[in-house]
């Protein structure tokens, strides 16, 4: 037997014994999952040789055929987190429309009459039912935003009454439905007059933190599936362990930046198309990131995500400077339409002794690698970039196990573009020799490395590998 209690705009379904009702156990509502995302395989220039791959080229010690597209790493088509993709369409929802975990207290709140009485007062009337709850679900009516007082009341529920809260210590899960907008944070600049004035995040360019009211939050699992934008600093320095943002189209500057000990391990943003500067920097427990619609990731966005292993971004076109710097544990990425890699984008990846880290970089539409773009990959063996035209200063450097580079459209090599790759054995270029600046191939071993080209002997007769003139240059079919 169940009873439905209605009081001052709140609805709470309780069992006969008075415990909050809910659906199946678990931390989050059941998401809608469509068919697996397409692999977005992209063909470059006709490779040579043209035989199809047979074994998994991403496996340890696997042999990779130069010129053969290695295809998408199978983890991105088989892993249930990394292959998720869905289209979210907003509709106004009410209590009962979602399967929420047991122990969730549900309230319906009319924001058009906010303050008569305010949300905090309505929650206080719930008494023991809310005290026993582990989750709070708020369904908004009459609008799609909370005023400052109501938002502050939610943020402070765990604090004692003397500090403006309700002393609720068991809550860990928050769901707010029909909420489309939420304020951003305030940057902790020295002139901000905030208690955090002058506080910065470590690493990189040491950006200022952003204060937002969530720093000491009780929320560990956050669901805001109707929120359309995460503004700058909205959730900077927060301890979330899971987030669900099915409608959000963008993540602003420092949106979730700097919370190195928060246990947020999986990030799935099905609708986001752009991720701002520093948005997830120093989220050091991230392991899997799935961004099915993102086209741009800005500077330092995932800098120092030191446990990150997989990134799936099948529509990504531009990857900013230091965007994946200090990703020590990274194993594989899926960037089939990526065109630009920024300065210092990747660095300090993997371990050369153990062989852990990214082994194959498949970048079929990449055209530009900026300065120090691909450097410090401990386990990297093969780079497949059939459309790459420009490799700037130190673009592909200090990769101790790099063996082959397939880039038949390279036309410009900046200073030291392939410096410090002692195991480099083959670089595949195209019909015409690229222009090259100084010391391009310094650090390669002439007895190992051969530069192959597909052009006529006459066109290549004067090409001498800059910084390493003893490296042989041969026609690919010789």
Image (cartoon, helix red, strand yellow):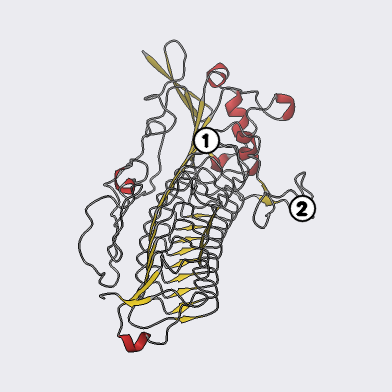
**To which residue does mark 1 refer?**
241
Secondary-structure class at tag 2: loop
In the orientation shown, which residue stands out farthest toward the top?
Answer: 17
Circles 2 and 1 in contact, beta carbons < 8 Å: no
Q: Nearer the viewer, residue 196 or 122?
A: 196
In percent of width and height, residue 36 lies at 28, 47
- Which residue is painted at 40% across and 56% down in the image? 381
Q: Nearer the viewer, residue 46 or 132?
A: 46
Secondary-structure class at tag 1: loop
Q: Quadrant of residue 155?
A: top right
Q: Quadrant of residue 152?
A: top right
In percent of width and height, residue 93 lies at 40, 39
In the picture, the quarter occupied by the C terminus is bottom left
| Horizontal side of residue 346 vs 100, given as left or right | right
Q: In the image, is residue 298 above or below residue 266?
A: below
- Which residue is painted at 39% across and 64% down in the image? 425
First-in-chain label (2 vs 1): 2
**To which residue does mark 2 refer?**
192
In the orientation shown, which residue stands out farthest toward the front?
Answer: 447
Which label sits in the foreground, 2 or 1? 1
Q: In the image, is residue 448 above or below residue 182?
A: below
- Which residue is painted at 58% across and 27% down in the image? 123
Q: For label 1, count other residues whose C-alpha is less than 10 Å away and answer few (under 14), some (14-19) or many (20+).
A: some
| Horizontal side of residue 188 vs 184, given as left or right | right
- Which residue is painted at 46% across and 51% down in the image? 248
Q: CA distance from mark 2 to mark 1?
A: 29 Å
Q: For label 2, count other residues whose C-alpha is less than 10 Å away and answer few (under 14), some (14-19) or many (20+).
A: few
Q: Decide if residue 144 is in sight here.
A: yes
In percent of width and height, residue 282 lies at 59, 46
């Amino acid at each position: 037997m169940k009873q439905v209690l209605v009081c001052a705009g709140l609805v709470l379904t309780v069992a006969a014994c008075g415990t909050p009702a809910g659906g199946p156990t678990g931390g989050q509502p059941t998401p809608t999952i469509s068919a697996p995302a397409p692999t977005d395989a992209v063909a470059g220039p006709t490779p040579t040789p043209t035989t199809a791959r047979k074994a998994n080229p991403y496996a340890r010690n696997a042999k990779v055929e130069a010129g053969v597209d290695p295809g998408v790493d199978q983890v991105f088509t088989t892993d249930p987190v990394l292959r998720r993709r869905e289209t979210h369409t907003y509709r106004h929802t009410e209590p009962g429309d979602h399967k929420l975990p047991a122990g969730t207290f549900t309230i319906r709140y009319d924001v058009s009459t906010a303050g008569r009485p305010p949300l905090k007062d309505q929650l206080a009337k719930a008494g023991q039912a809310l005290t026993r709850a582990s989750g709070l679900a708020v369904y908004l009516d009459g609008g799609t935003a909370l005023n400052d007082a109501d938002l502050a009341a939610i943020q402070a529920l765990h604090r004692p009454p003397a500090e403006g809260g309700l002393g609720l210590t068991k809550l860990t899960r928050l769901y707010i439905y029909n909420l489309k907008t939420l304020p951003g944070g305030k940057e902790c600049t020295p002139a901000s007059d905030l208690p955090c004035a002058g506080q910065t995040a470590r690493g990189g360019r040491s950006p200022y933190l952003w204060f937002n009211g969530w720093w000491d939050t009780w929320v560990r699992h956050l669901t805001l599936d109707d929120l359309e934008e995460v503004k700058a600093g909205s959730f900077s320095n927060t301890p979330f362990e899971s987030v669900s943002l099915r409608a959000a189209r963008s993540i602003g500057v420092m949106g979730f930046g700097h919370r190195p000990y928060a246990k947020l391990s999986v990030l799935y943003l099905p609708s986001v198309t752009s991720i701002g500067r520093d948005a997830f920097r120093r989220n050091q427990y991230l392991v899997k990131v799935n961004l099915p619609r993102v086209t741009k990731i800005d500077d330092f966005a995932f800098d120092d995500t030191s446990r990150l292993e997989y990134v799936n971004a099948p529509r990504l076109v531009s990857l900013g400077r230091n965007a994946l710097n200090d990703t020590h544990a990274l194993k594989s990425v899926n960037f089939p339409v990526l065109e630009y890699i920024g300065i210092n984008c990747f660095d300090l990846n993997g371990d050369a002794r153990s062989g852990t880290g990214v082994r194959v970089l498949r970048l079929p539409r990449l055209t530009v690698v900026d300065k120090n773009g691909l450097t410090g990959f401990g386990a990297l063996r093969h780079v497949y970039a059939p459309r790459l035209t420009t490799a700037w200063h130190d673009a592909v450097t200090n990769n101790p196990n790099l063996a082959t580079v397939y880039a038949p459209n390279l036309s410009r090599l900046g200073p030291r573009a392939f410096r410090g790759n002692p195991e480099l054995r083959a670089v595949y270029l195209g019909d015409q020799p690229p222009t090259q600046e100084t010391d391009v191939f310094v650090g390669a071993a002439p007895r190992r490395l051969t530069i192959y080209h597909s052009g006529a002997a006459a066109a290549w007769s004067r090409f001498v590998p800059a910084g390493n003139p003893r490296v042989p240059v041969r026609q690919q079919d010789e």
